Image: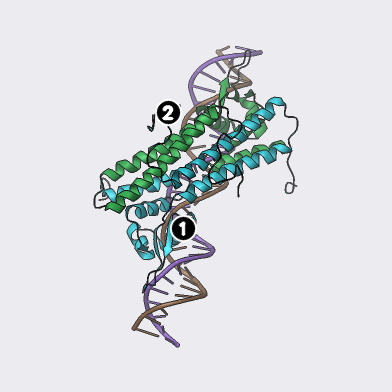
Chain colours: A cyan, B green, C purple, D brown
Amino acid sequence: MLFGMTQDSETDFIEAMGLILQGDGMPRIAGRLMGLFVLHGGPFSFTNLADRLEISRGSVSTNTRLLEDLGVIERVAIKGERQDFFRLASDPYAEIVERKRTRSIRARETILRNAETLDDLGQDGLKRVDELANFFRVLAMATDRALDDLRDGDGASPRTSKTHPPLAAE
Amino acid sequence: MLFGMTQDSETDFIEAMGLILQGDGMPRIAGRLMGLFVLHGGPFSFTNLADRLEISRGSVSTNTRLLEDLGVIERVAIKGERQDFFRLASDPYAEIVERKRTRSIRARETILRNAETLDDLGQDGLKRVDELANFFRVLAMATDRALDDLRDGDGASPRTSKTHPPLAAE
DNA sequence: CAATTCGTTCAATCAATACTGAACAAAATA
DNA sequence: TATTTTGTTCAGTATTGATTGAACGAATTG
């Protein structure tokens, strides 16, 4: 039987990471890989990854490349070994935030560019478009600060929100 | 013929918004609706929305409810009218950011909760898990600030990043 | 050189989700 | 009361993207 079977807590952690990254629009397997690399830093061989996570070699190839592009992991060569090895990068999260920032900026640019060719918008219409663009600008600025915070290796909160307790899901 | 046919700039704007929101994990139709409401504030009747965007009544129902829950639009009643009407809400973007914030906090909590039951992680393992949790904490703080900025109706940048020019996609 | 190992690619399958359109209940109208 | 209008729900379809597994070329080994 398989149902009701409980898994060990390492698997729970890895699967949880799979779901979290999936919820953020990435492949679940990328999340599982990330979870594994956070638990044990690596290096893991290509084959080892496929075996431990029980995923196909194709998925290992695709998703390690994805995480490599994101700067979450890096490919390392090991003397006397034929396989590729991967380990958690030294600054795994910066590029993720950087991409979020870029997406917000792009969205804002797209909006402003499309708005240029619009006429027949009144005073109010222009204001609403401006506020939409500003929304994305604010998002971009927020990720920008997040990048700074990450770089500073910011362990404790240096600034508390005006409107929220330090951290709780409410 | 249909191909090569160009659409007016209003449609371009609306479609662009559809793609932007789709890229953020929401239904494309929700984005189109949002685009329409940003251009013209409303109120639009239920049927009018279906006609203008050429979408089914089912989609109007589902996606207006989604945007209503998000606080982007609000349902209004108009004297002498049977249909529901919708207009852009007064503070359309706050709840969107609030949800982003909640997701980051939840992710952090999930990680910390799963990490508790883990043993056999060395010094290094604990550090990596901590840094992962901190990553989501930083994201939560960033959205938190974004929320403040939005409320302040912040039109000009009060603080410039240490590492990036004021705003460009690079 | 033949056989194996390795990582990538790609066609096929699978899974998740969006969207439609018909069925429905409630309310308004005739 | 019968008909129409209205918004929701839901089953079915379409679409999109993730995942697999086989085919492949390159490199290694025997």
Reply above or below: A74 against C30.
below
* Badge nearest the viewer, 2 or 1: 2
Image-quadrant location for residue B42? top right
**Please, what is the three-letter code of the amino acid marked with disc 2?**
His
Q: What numbered label is drawn on residue A164?
A: 2
The answer to whether residue B50 shows anywhere in this view is no
Residue drawn where x is 60% and y is 17% of the image:
B82
Q: Chain of mark 1?
A: A
Instruction: Give percent across and percent down for residue A11.
Output: 30, 50
- Label 2: state its secondary structure: loop
Q: Tell me the element at label 1.
A: helix
Q: What residue did someone put label 1 on?
A: A68
Q: Residue placed at 42% from the left, 36% from the top?
A: A158
Give the numbered dot on residue B77: none
Q: Who is closer to the viewer here, A135 or B149?
A: B149
The answer to whether B75 appears left or right of A46 in the picture is right
Residue A66 screen position, x and y as percent: 48, 56
Q: Is residue A160 left or right of residue B149?
A: left
- Residues tagged by mark 2 and mark 1 found on one chain of the structure: yes
- The residue positioned 62% from the left and 13% from the top of the image is B79
* Above or below D25: residue B6: above
Circle nearer the N terminus (2, 1)? 1
User: Relative to A126, is D18 above or below?
Assistant: below
Residue B131 screen position, x and y as percent: 37, 47
Local crowd at mark 1 within 10 Å, few (<14), some, or many (≥20)?
some
Amino acid type, callout 1: Glu
Mark 2 Cα shell of 10 Å, populated few (<14), some (14-19), many (≥20) = some
- Between the C-alphas of marks 2 and 1, the distance is 36 Å
Q: Nearer the viewer, residue B130 or C10?
A: B130
> Viewer-proximal residue, A147 or B24?
A147
> Is residue B115 visible to the viewer in this orientation of the structure?
yes
